[in-house]
Amino acid sequence: MVRNLGIGTGRRKTAVARVYLREGTGKITVNNLELEKYFPIAEIAGSVRQPLVVTASDNKFDIVINVVGGGPNGQAGACRHGIARALSQVDPASSLALRNNGFLTRDPRMVERKKYGQRGARRRFQFSKR
């Protein structure tokens, strides 16, 4: 029986990540793939690990993440948010460090919706005076 120490839901743009913290050695699995295989770009994979580095718990937990929606950057942001929430649930003392680095704040920026009668969210059709 696998026991989850902490559960966190992370969101960014249209991506949603469910994060499960378990006892282990620091292995991160995203949608049944290793972190480096799922996020092959080093900067994106590094941003997912940031909450673990800040709280100095890189090798304490195994992390299982299920993420859906959005693109690579949005999914990485959702994973980071979920990991931070799960870590603050396991160790409430670490939530201050996570909050100061901005990992517990949900990024509110979303794609603006397209308006009717126009070409895009802000783009207008060309105006012709004559």
Image (cartoon, grey):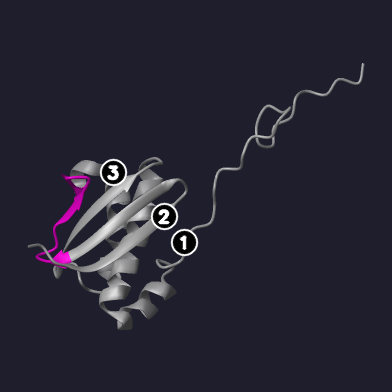
Q: Badge 1 is on which residue?
A: 106
Magenta segment: does it hold 26?
yes
The residue stretch that appears in magenta: 22-35
Image point (70%, 31%), residue name: 116
Camera-side residue of 40 and 110: 110
Disc 2 from disc 3: Cα separation:
20 Å
The residues tagged by marks 2 and 1 sit, at their Cα atoms, a distance apart of 7 Å
Q: Earlier in the sequence, mark 1 or mark 3?
A: 3
- Crowding at dot 3, Cα within 10 Å, few <14 / some 14-19 / many 20+, comes out as few
Q: Is residue 106 left or right of residue 126?
A: left
Q: Name the residue under label 2.
A: 11
Mark 2, other Cα within 10 Å: few <14 / some 14–19 / many ≥20: many
Residue 53 vertical placement versus 125 (above, below) = below
Residue 67 colored in magenta in the image: no
Count of marks, rendered view: 3
Vertically, is 3 above or below 114? Answer: below
Instruction: In this rendered view, identify the residue nearer to me: 115 or 75.
Output: 115
